[in-house]
Amino acid sequence: MKLASVGSKFVFVLFFVLGLALAAGTPAGTEIRNQASAKYTDSSGQPQTTTSNEVVTVVQPVYGFTLTPDGTEAAPGQIKTGLQGAPVYFNYTVTNTGNIADTVQLTAPQGTSDSFDFTSVKIYHDANCNGTIDPGEAEVSSVSLDADASTCVIVEAVIPAGEADGNTGHANLSGTSVGDPAQTDTANWARAVVTSQAVLDAAKGSSPSGAVVPGAAIDYAVQGSNKGGSAAGAVTGVAVVDGSPLDGILVADAVPAHTTYVLGSAGGTAGAGSATVIYKVGGAWTTTEPASGSDVSEVALLIEGAGAFFPQGAQYRLGFQVTVDAGTPAGTTIENTATVNFDANGDGDAGDTGEQVGSNTTRTPVAASRAVLNGPAGDPDSDGAGFASSYTDPGGTTWTYTETTDTSDPRNDDAQRINEAVHGGDVVYFKNSLTNGGNVEDSYTLDLSGVPAGWTCQVMAADATTPMANPVGPLVAGATLDYVVKCSIPANVTTASDTDLTARATSTNDPAVWNETHDVIPPVLSGYALDLAKDGASTDNDPTNDNPASQAVDPGATAFYGFEVANTGQNPDTYDLSVTVPAGMTATVYPDPDCDGVLDSPAPAPVTDSGLVNPGSKACFVLAVQVPDGAPPLTQDPNDPADDNVTITATSNANPAISDTITTDVAVNPVADLRFSPDRNGTVTSPGTIVYTHTVSNLGNEAASVTFAESGSTHPGWTYQISTDGGATWTDVASAAPINLTPGSSQQVQVRVIVPDGEPIGAIDTNQITANANYPTATDDSASVTDTTTVVGGDLRIEKRGETCADAACATVTSADGSQAKPGEYIRYTVTASNIGTADLKKVIVSDPLPGYTDFVSVSASTSVAGAQPLFSTDGTNWSTTAPATLATGQAVFVGLDSNGDGAIDENDLLAPGESLTLVFTVQVQ
Amino acid sequence: MNLRRAAWAAVFFVLAVAAAPPLWLELASFRVLQVTNADGERLEVFERAASAAPGETLEWRLAATNRSDRALEDVVLVIPVPPGTRYLADSAEPLELGGVVVRPEFSFDGGVRFARPPLYKKVVVVVDGIEQEQEVEVKPEAYTHVRWVLPALDAGQTVTVRLRTVVR
């Protein structure tokens, strides 16, 4: 045995892609991606979804190849006859069964259980697999193949000259993978048998030499010649044609599976005899072509003749055409082998060695014919049939769609558009269908384009929950996969026109194969909306009843308005609440959880916004408008929104362009309030004069014109006069000029009482002086004081006046006449006893009770009498130089004049004419 | 500086925790290798599967943890059969959870419908020129998704479900 020498000058490294059977597995480098998902119900009863991490596993390379036909040395895979000194040719197919491109090193060692070694053994690459070494087909020592690809090689073995008939020689085409040298195939033995009789060879070719797709044509040609040492003879009854057994040489070729004979395509010639093309129809030969090519199962060339009629060198040829059946899966190999039956030894049969010759086998792979159909759910081919016009998403929302198709488009353009209104914040869904329209399993990359910035769009599995990672598939030929496009629209988005999301499915194996479908979202409406209205009037779709009722209040009072803001949008939102009110008024908004329009007690903390309001919910509030004291009357028409002077505006925080405003009125009532005080008491001698000071105040909110009247003296001859200018001029009370008092202003008026001579001691005169205020709109008001004057016989006159102070020391006087006092303020009374007579007065004691609703603060006294001292007592009996520190309600303080300084008040204590004793008594208003 | 970095780290951690879903899923894949030990016993060995060759078996393990402080109900765990692989029959095991056996369910339509095997689908075949609808069994190789429907998952509880696929 010797190793066949393999020429090295024609070593080619070629890659052949004759077809991808995908039998060898997923291509090396492919990423297997997986991501789990889960659905669950959380503790609040809400359905939730979540996904896991994504796991990526890369497919490793696997090497493998086959050489066929297989054979052992004892039972070779192929046997050829040949003349001594001439070459024989053995045809092999090399197939890469791995998942990665590889190079197979080829050798052809000779056998050890045979008669001879070949003179030479060479390996040729039969690039077009036609079974013969064509010009340009080189000697090789290796072939390189893509994954799943196959190609042909021919081993040329030359029989030594002088070998006797019947001697045998063996060769074994062997291969080793370069990528994985452990992968070998070393059992592909072939045998050559030496003969000197006729040898008809048969070489079969096919065109195209490469892969075909369904629908394509394959031209087959089988040809050969008598390369033997004598003429070939006819086989008796080699075929029964149209019922008649005929003699001759038969070159037969079956129409391969997955193909159909093309009518009129068969033709043949022969260098000797009479050549006729015959067809096998229904299992019987006929010379007549049937009406349908699919009825032809076999085509043959019948070369009729008698005896040894086909001489050395005579040639024959049979050719015909088939088409590859539609739907033939990619990776299918269409194999075809022709056979020749002849008689080599003159015994009239084809049963002896070498009398039945098989050609090489042509292998035509069916290539991947890739196509992808991508359209709306149910209508991937976008012809409008089967379109699923509605889809219910995982949240239970049912979407409906309108489909448009364009079958004039080369790729059948199509779109489905949502019929429902879409709002910002919505999550929209489209269900689409993807079909593998090719003849090979394929995977696809699904890409979404046209997604506006900020939107989140995902391709999900048909459950709309599991994210779908690219590539999707693989899908076997004809299989359909539904997927869902899920798009979350940002809450603050609105669009003026349609949004076209284009989902493109692209074959991962052929980027030129793609198909698009358009998922169209109509103009996105605002996801934010609100309705501001008085309590109970939101969301009733009646904007005419939204305004709260008008309110009219007095100055210093508060007007309340109940209102509510309803979130009529699709998303949670917070609303800023702004209020405008007339100048000088203050507005405060309080929450009103019970929505009764009444401010709760205690009042909750004021707010300036609504807080978060969920879609479909509302929040209630009370607006309090504080009218300041003394505010002038304000008249509003409650039926005329145009003059409304209170506005409430709620503005979306998320989208400040969204707001709602309601209006109402706050009116201020005209208020009449005239005050005139205090009543006065005085003593006077007869004749004598006394002046009382009063204060008239306008506490209403309009200017008042004040006139005076009197009830009149009960004593004839007594005269009452009034002065409104501080005593400069005096008039009758009724004749006094009106005084105008602006709101909140006061004015002092003096009333003078002139007592005529001769009035009896103890005479008392009472006169009620009335101030009448005339208001422009408010009801007129009046107030009165009563002056009581007592005629005294002595010459002691008691005058008492009061003043209101902010502090106990009376540093700040708030009311000069003590007519008004607020709780906590101080009133200081000054009582002055004066001797207005002409003789001394004895044992002068002045007392003053603690007024009701007051607390005693202090008392002090002084006198104008030189050397005298005032003494204090709380009972009029026991005297002290020290003023009392306390005084109970109902008690009075006594001050006596101790002119002789003996510590007692008695007849010896004198108040000389013109002298006085003064008591200062301070109390605090409770 | 370190304090500031720590503070930022703390802030980030808080945010990360706040964003974590109550149900935490972790998926891992392992190559299933057959080895023979010194005693001649055949054993299965698992290797983390960054890569795998055609024909090799991958085991997918999905660990689901309830990280919330409340029980979660109706927890549906789904492991897809990833493209490039096929489901290995009988490899998805039932899960025993609190005395209840949760059997896996299978889908062949991309996870839309699930049922326990055998699964059937209707196909249209032509018999003697007449279209007929026939029900045929879907082989496990064609399964696309496997799920386990858990009645509840207690707070802090972790369950692991698994299945195997073979690299095509």
Image (cartoon, rainbow, N blue to C red):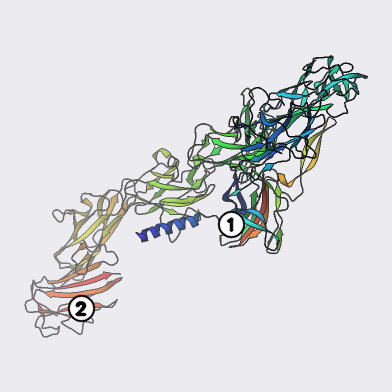
Q: Nearer the viewer, residue B143 or A12?
A: A12
Q: Nearer the viewer, residue A769 or A59?
A: A59
The reply to the same-chain question for discs 2 and 1 is yes
- Residue A339 found in image quarter: top right
Position above or below: A844 against A819: below
Disc number placed over residue A894 in the picture, else none: 2
Residue drawn at 43 percent across, 59 percent down: B10
Furthest-left residue in this view: A866
Q: Where residue A272 sits in the image (x, y, percent)? A: 82, 14
Q: Specify which label sits upstream in the sequence, 2 or 1.
A: 1
Where is the N terminus of chain B found, in terms of image quarters?
Answer: bottom left
Please state if A77 lies on the left or on the right of B151 as rendered. right
Residue A920 appears in the rendering: yes
Q: Secondary structure at mark 2?
A: strand
What chain is tagged by disc 1? A
Disc number placed over residue A44 in the picture, else none: 1
Residue drawn at 26 percent across, 58 percent down: A676
Please state if A416 lies on the left or on the right of A725 as rendered. right
